[in-house]
Amino acid sequence: MSQRLKNKVALITGAAQGLGKEMASSMIKEGAEVILSDVNETLLEKTAKEFSSSFSKLDVTNKEEWKSIIKKIGKDFGSLNILVNNAGIGGGDNVESTDIEMWHKVHDVNLNSVFLGCKYALPLMRESGDGSIINISSMSGIVASHNLAAYNSSKAAVRHLSKSVALHCAKTTNLVRCNSIHPVFARTDMVQTLIDSAPDRNIEEKLVKQIPLRKLAEPIDIANAAVFLASDESSFITGTELLIDGGLSAT
């Protein structure tokens, strides 16, 4: 590996599995000191042991836990250069079938957590001299569907929040950047569960048909993009969205 992230400290939420785990693995290989966080403490400890990495349980919807983990990172590592707001959930249905409790839950985990992460990490990132905030949104935040009202809404809001954060950072410090990543269906545990539990046994075939490249994304595809945005190679990129969609948005 080229050590593109050498001497950088990263915090990744939802890092115990799926895209978060893949991004953590890639960043560690590129030389970053990565702190893994997740609400699933058992799985988090297992992943951290696998990577011989630091970890801390984090409920991303809890502002006090955000304050605590940022304070701990400052004390233990002295800096924070990369924040990946990756934690998220699916859920919900069309606008009529989604109850208000599910609506709030999806927005709390997918959107409010990103607000909290940016808010409480920024002071330490600013002090650290440079930084990259990477918010994991979704193609569902760009292209809507009829049966994911809450998820579509939360992921679209992450896109626009990222732009607001980027402009704020540019105004207050030109060394911290913020961008969002928008993956198409990736072969993660969450997507596989969706495929396995769907009444329509041809659901994977139907998902693939929507993608011009005719395949699902792999977690490494998203991890490679995150490494690029975390590295100095993207030092003039802020306030934008990176679509990893196999051409879906071009149709």
Image (cartoon, helix red, strand yellow):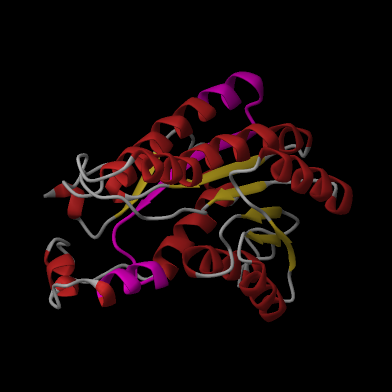
Residue 233 x, y percent position in the rendering: 54, 49
Q: Quarter of the image containing the N terminus?
A: bottom right
In this view, the residue farthest toward the bottom is: 50
From the viewer's side, name the closer residue of 37 and 76. Answer: 37
Q: Is residue 184 magenta?
A: yes
Residue in view at x 73 percent, y 46 percent:
80
Q: Quadrant of residue 240?
A: top left
Relative placement, left or right, of 7 versus 205 is right
Q: Compared to 34, does 116 lie above or below?
A: above
Residue in view at x 52 percent, y 54 percent:
87
From the viewer's side, name the closer residue of 181 and 113. Answer: 113
Q: Compared to 196, does 57 lie above or below?
A: above
Residue 244 x, y percent position in the rendering: 32, 55
Relative placement, left or right, of 60 versus 195 is right
Relative placement, left or right, of 153 versus 69 is left
The magenta stretch is: 167-195
Residue 171 x, y percent position in the rendering: 59, 19
Q: Is residue 192 magenta?
A: yes
From the viewer's side, name the closer residue of 226 and 52. Answer: 52
Q: Quadrant of residue 185?
A: bottom left
Q: Quadrant of residue 39?
A: bottom right
Q: Compared to 19, does 51 lie above or below?
A: below
